[in-house]
Image (tube, coloured by chain):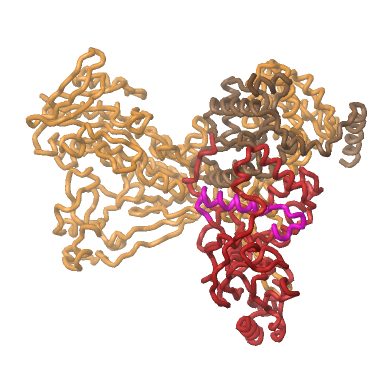
Chain colours: A orange, B brown, C red
């Protein structure tokens, strides 16, 4: 085998601390190296031409490039190799920049290390085998998990591009948190008015299969070929017959037993209910936990009310399987619960603010419901405790956010804006009202955002106080908010009628659980990780699974929508060809040597290992061996290290190659 | 004079190998480079796809090839590119480390870390730490004695000739 | 003993099993494994303190498996197994090597065995694994023979004490094991008797790449013995056959016992206890210790 070694100076980036000509000279002496040269910029056009010419003149079979990290230019040099007629997998990169010249100062030891790194690469490339890309078919259907604004947008985009979508929402209706909001910043347009048409469009779209009140049970498979199992929870209403007339809802005798989660606990709902008037689909759900029928088998008022016999008490959860090629995860967020935290929670809570103890200390979403025309107060600002109009409201920002002592270090991003909006809405509705906002910093980065906050301060005369609130307590029917104005340097006591806490955005409690089902990693809070923070913001690290909206990090509506469209277009790109090409770094079993212990099957994170029977001439199975599905295997190599008989090899990183690298130390 | 100074005075530099996963630690090492952090030049990296793919025999091989210390590093738990490769690795290393420890290989010789793609600083710190640790305990005499049993020192001239022959043989055999 | 012979004969006569793997007496203080297919030969079977071998190893042998295979499918095999040997069966079932439904396990109520053939059975000569035995009978077997009797109290002295070796400084431990491993002649008797060493081609026999140097010099010996112990970590059931078979008297079970202790200490795992347990290798817990990792 004839190997060519190409040492890049990277301008001066490598050559400043590594004596590149000496590396090239020394490496020429390594057995097998036919040609060795150093050059100013290997990645440049002349640099690549140098490779091509050298391959031709010296009849090279393999190439080692000593340059920057393979994460930068491995692809460049592989293409150069292909252009020169060499298999792209007979190219190895010695990382002389990030792992050598940039991190060492002494020229002698850096040069020595560079030589050794190149030698390791040469020894590896000698054992490298030519590989070719693997083709896998693509199912052109997308599973969207979560029916908030991000999921809705993603589903519509994919469907409008002409592909089928399965949209799964765990609540009885799509719409998510956006459907709860009264107005949206910075335009103060009505949230419902812009969202509802989208929800209806989803429901009517011929390419979207909407599964509400459903949850993803598990996802198997791999990019282009996922198999999703979805649990459709029993609504106890026959969806095919129900017309959504709501007769059952109005006849239900259970009036004050269950709080409406859509109203954030500010109102009751019956046992059979439609979460909100604009719900899509407009079909009720029976809540087994409060329904009289499920307690003693009596009642049945709703059955009598329904003229279509749509009530079905015996309905059971059903399972369905969907074959999809891509998954878009858009599961959104919940608010940091600011009251007392359950034992063992990683969050500390804000007991000192009295949430949960004082009825008029509420969180941001509750205020949205109070301010909303469709809310429990029909849009009039009234206190939850006595229904009186509050004259003085204190808004507190960063409740939870940016407070490592309470368990969260990040900024929730939307609270500055929605607090300004809520203070404004209050001032618009209660003309003689006073609004105070305690803030740490105003973070109003966004189109028209800063102007919006200024408007709240200057036109609507919202009082902004820079400082934290230490305690809230009740005195003579007022809530005394004890804080500090850090700019004036004086303590502030405000006797408020109501307090609104802008609590942090956190992932849902079951976010890690879903992540494990889908097979994507998450951070310590439970937010799903993107593949690259800058260049791959909507891809998860699992190929074919994309992220949209606040399941990834705190996001506002326009960002969630943009992300959803980006995720949708990623899925559409995936569907642009009938089959996928993927890297051939996959594991393969030597069936002769396999002892059939199936430890590989136990450790495989992707379920890629299958059982294959080896039969004797009578057709009796005398041995079971492992077989790795090339399409499912992601090439981690955990099986190769676990295999006791060493009968699995990972292409591109096989044991012989790694041993050669070790031997070259 | 402490151990470290004694070993350095002899002009000895430890040889350290790191088996790192492609996604986190390798990228973390890249970040250490892009951030121009400085660390000793004793460690050489062998890239594998996942910390779960590192076979314990690789480590024995490294010792056999004269390594004074070995580092295995991957993604933090729950952050594995392959979801669970590092969890399997963790179990494997817990057992293997206990075995080597029992067999009399100093704990410092084989170390483990979780270094994410964003922890360039941690990577530099870990390399510095392990290099210092190894400098402190000195060359891996135990294994080197075993190695010496059958390592013949070639005279310099002979060596070149041998290399020449090897090269020719390779050229002939392809 | 007679009961066992009768039972085994019945099994063969009724063609319930293809063969019976058991022990036969050779000389006064020695037995050897025997594979019986002829019902009349069952009179050779014995059960006593000299039944040292772990016969489970034969269940995975190609020839024995071939005995059970016929055109009609797979027939059962009967095996005589001490309660402690049954742990090997459990481990093999966990590792997909044998199936319970293809097995007839004939066990005994055991009261200990001798440390080696030729010794008189008493407290001095009790096998090491019997000293702290707590599985004198097994519920996993199809049938158990013999009466329950107490194991004699150990009055002998063990050649190597695990806790003493643990106390040594690392360099001394390495010296100790090197000295021991240097004795190794790479006969692989340890591998041949181990029920869990069932690979068709062992890692040490692989040449491309060469995993373990096969000559019996210090380095190759060290690597072989470490890798052997590693591959058995969390799997070894402590039958001690490797050490008994070793012609060079290397205290192999020291390593195995240490790893078994570690498995229990770190993960609360004991191998061969139940087929319901996930195997130690091949499973993980998110809560596994992170102590080793910087």
Q: Residue at x 57, y 77 (%)?
A: C146
Looking at the rendering, the stretch of residues picked out in magenta corresponds to C242-269
Q: Quadrant of the C terminus of chain A?
A: top right
Taking C254 as reference, is A436 above or below it? above
Q: Quadrant of residue B9?
A: top right
Residue A549 is left or right of residue A390, and the answer is right
Q: Nearer the viewer, residue A596 or A589?
A: A596
Residue C185 is left or right of residue B81, and the answer is right
Q: Position of residue A269 (x, y in %)?
A: 18, 51
Q: Nearer the viewer, residue A305 or C276?
A: C276
Q: Position of residue A385 (x, y in %)?
A: 12, 39
- Find the residue positioned furthest to the left: A476
Residue B35, magenta (yes or no): no
Q: Nearer the viewer, residue A134 or A305?
A: A134
**Prevailing secondary structure of the magenta residues:** helix
Q: Residue at x 34, y 51 (%)?
A: A170
Q: Residue at x 33, y 28 (%)?
A: A403
Taking C132 as reference, is A101 above or below it? above
Q: Quadrant of residue A91?
A: top right
């Amino acid at each position: 085998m004839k190997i060519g070694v190409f040492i890049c100076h990277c301008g001066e980036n490598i050559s400043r601390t590594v004596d590149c000509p000496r590396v090239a000279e020394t490496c020429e002496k390594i057995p097998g190296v036919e040609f060795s040269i150093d050059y100013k910029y290997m990645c440049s056009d002349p640099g690549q031409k140098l490779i091509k010419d050298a391959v031709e003149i010296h009849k090279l079979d393999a190439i080692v490039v000593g340059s920057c990290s393979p994460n930068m230019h491995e692809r460049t040099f592989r293409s150069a190799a292909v252009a020169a007629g060499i298999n792209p997998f007979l190219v190895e990169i010695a990382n002389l920049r990030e792992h050598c010249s940039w991190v060492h100062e002494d020229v002698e030891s850096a040069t020595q290390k560079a030589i050794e790194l190149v030698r390791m690469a040469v020894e590896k490339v000698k054992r490298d085998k030519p590989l070719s890309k693997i083709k896998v078919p693509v199912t052109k259907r997308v599973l969207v998990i979560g029916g908030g604004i991000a999921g809705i947008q993603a589903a519509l985009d994919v469907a409008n591009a002409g592909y089928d979508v399965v949209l799964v929402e765990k609540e009885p209706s799509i719409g998510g948190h956006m459907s709860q909001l009264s107005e949206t910043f910075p335009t103060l347009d009505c949230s419902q008015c812009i969202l509802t048409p989208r929800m209806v469009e989803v429901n009517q779209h011929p390419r979207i299969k909407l599964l509400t009140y459903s949850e993803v049970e598990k996802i198997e498979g791999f990019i282009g070929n996922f198999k999703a199992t979805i649990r459709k929870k029993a609504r106890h209403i026959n969806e095919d017959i129900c017309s959504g007339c709501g007769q059952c809802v109005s006849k239900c005798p259970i009036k004050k037993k269950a709080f409406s989660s859509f109203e954030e606990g500010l109102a009751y709902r019956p046992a059979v209910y439609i979460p909100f008037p604009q719900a899509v689909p407009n079909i009720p759900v029976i809540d087994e936990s409060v329904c009289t029928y499920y307690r003693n088998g009596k009642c049945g008022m709703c059955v009598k009310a329904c003229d279509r016999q749509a009530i079905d008490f015996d309905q059971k959860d059903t399972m369905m399987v969907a074959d999809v090629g891509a998954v878009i995860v858009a599961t959104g967020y919940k608010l940091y619960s600011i009251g007392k935290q359950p034992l063992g929670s990683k969050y500390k809570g804000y007991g000192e603010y009295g949430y949960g103890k004082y009825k008029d200390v509420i969180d941001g979403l509750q205020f949205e419901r109070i301010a909303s025309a469709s809310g429990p107060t029909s849009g009039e600002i009234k206190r939850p405790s006595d229904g009186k109009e509050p004259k003085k409201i204190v808004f507190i920002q960063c409740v939870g956010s940016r407070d490592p002592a309470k368990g969260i270090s990040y900024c929730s991003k939307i609270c500055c804006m929605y607090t300004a909006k809520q203070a404004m809405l209050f001032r618009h509705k209660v003309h003689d009202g006073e609004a105070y906002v305690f803030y740490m910093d105003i973070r109003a980065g966004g189109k028209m955002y800063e102007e919006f906050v200024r408007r709240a301060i200057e036109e609507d005369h919202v009082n902004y106080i820079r400082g934290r609130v230490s305690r809230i307590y009740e005195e003579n029917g007022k809530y005394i908010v004890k804080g500090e104005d850090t700019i004036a340097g004086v303590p502030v006591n405000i006797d408020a009628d109501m307090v609104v806490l802008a609590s942090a955005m956190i992932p849902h409690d079951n976010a890690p659980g879903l992540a494990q089902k889908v097979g994507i990693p998450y951070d310590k809070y439970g937010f799903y990780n993107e593949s690259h923070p800058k260049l791959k913001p909507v891809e998860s690290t699992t190929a074919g699974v994309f992220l949209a909206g606040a399941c990834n990090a705190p996001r506002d509506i326009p960002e969630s929508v943009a992300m959803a469209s980006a995720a949708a277009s990623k899925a559409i790109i995936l569907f642009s060809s009938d089959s996928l090409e993927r890297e051939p770094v996959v594991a393969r079993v030597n069936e002769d040597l396999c002892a059939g212990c199936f430890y590989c099957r136990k450790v495989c994170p992707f379920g890629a290992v299958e059982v294959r029977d080896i039969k004797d001439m009578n057709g009796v199975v005398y041995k079971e061996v492992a077989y790795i599905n090339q399409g499912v295997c992601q090439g981690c190599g955990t099986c190769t290290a676990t295999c006791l008989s060493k009968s699995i090899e990972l292409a591109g990183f096989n044991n012989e190659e790694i041993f050669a690298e070790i031997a070259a130390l | 004079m402490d151990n470290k100074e004694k070993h350095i005075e002899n002009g000895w530099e430890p040889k350290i190998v790191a088996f790192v996963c492609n996604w986190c630690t390798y990228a973390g090492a890249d970040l250490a480079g892009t951030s121009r952090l400085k660390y000793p030049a004793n460690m050489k990296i062998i890239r594998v796809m996942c910390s779960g793919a590192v076979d314990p025999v690789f480590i024995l091989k490294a010792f056999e090839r004269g390594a004074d210390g070995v580092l295995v590093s991957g993604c933090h738990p729950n952050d594995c590119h392959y979801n669970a490769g590092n969890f399997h690795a963790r179990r494997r290393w817990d057992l293997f480390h206990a075995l080597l420890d029992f067999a009399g290989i100093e704990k410092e010789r084989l170390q483990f870390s979780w270094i994410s793609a964003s922890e360039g600083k941690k990577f530099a710190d870990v390399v510095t730490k392990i290099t210092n640790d190894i400098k402190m305990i000195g060359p891996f005499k135990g294994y080197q004695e075993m190695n010496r049993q059958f390592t013949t020192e070639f005279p310099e001239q002979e060596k070149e000739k041998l290399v020449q022959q090897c090269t020719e043989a390779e050229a002939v055999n392809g | 003993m007679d009961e066992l012979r009768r039972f085994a004969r019945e099994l063969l006569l009724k063609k319930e099993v293809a063969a019976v793997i058991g022990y036969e007496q050779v000389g006064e203080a020695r037995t050897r494994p025997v594979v019986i297919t002829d019902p009349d030969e069952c009179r050779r079977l014995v059960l006593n303190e000299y039944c040292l071998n772990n016969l489970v190893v034969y269940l995975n042998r190609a020839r024995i498996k071939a005995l059970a295979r016929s055109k009609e499918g797979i027939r059962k095999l009967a095996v005589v197994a001490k309660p402690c040997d049954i742990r090997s069966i459990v481990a093999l079932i966990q590792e997909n090597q044998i199936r319970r439904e293809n097995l007839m396990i004939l066990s005994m109520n055991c009261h200990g065995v001798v440390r080696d053939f030729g010794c008189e059975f008493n407290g001095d000569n009790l096998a090491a694994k019997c000293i702290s035995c707590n599985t004198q009978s097994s519920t996993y077997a199809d049938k158990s023979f013999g009466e329950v009797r107490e194991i004699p109290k150990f009055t002998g002295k063990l050649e190597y004490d695990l806790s003493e070796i643990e106390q040594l400084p690392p360099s001394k431990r390495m010296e100790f094991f090197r000295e021991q491993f240097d004795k190794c002649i790479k006969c692989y008797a340890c591998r041949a008797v181990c029920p869990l060493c069932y690979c068709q081609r062992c890692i040490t026999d692989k040449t491309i790449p060469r995993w373990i140097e096969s000559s019996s010099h210090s380095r190759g010996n060290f690597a072989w013995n470490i890798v052997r112990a590693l591959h058995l970590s969390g799997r070894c059931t402590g039958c001690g056959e490797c050490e008994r078979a070793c012609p060079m008297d290397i205290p192999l079970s020291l390593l195995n016992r240490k790893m078994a202790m570690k498995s229990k200490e770190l993960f609360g795992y004991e191998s061969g206890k139940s087929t319901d347990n996930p195997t130690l290798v091949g499973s993980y817990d998110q809560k596994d210790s992170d102590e080793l990792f910087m």
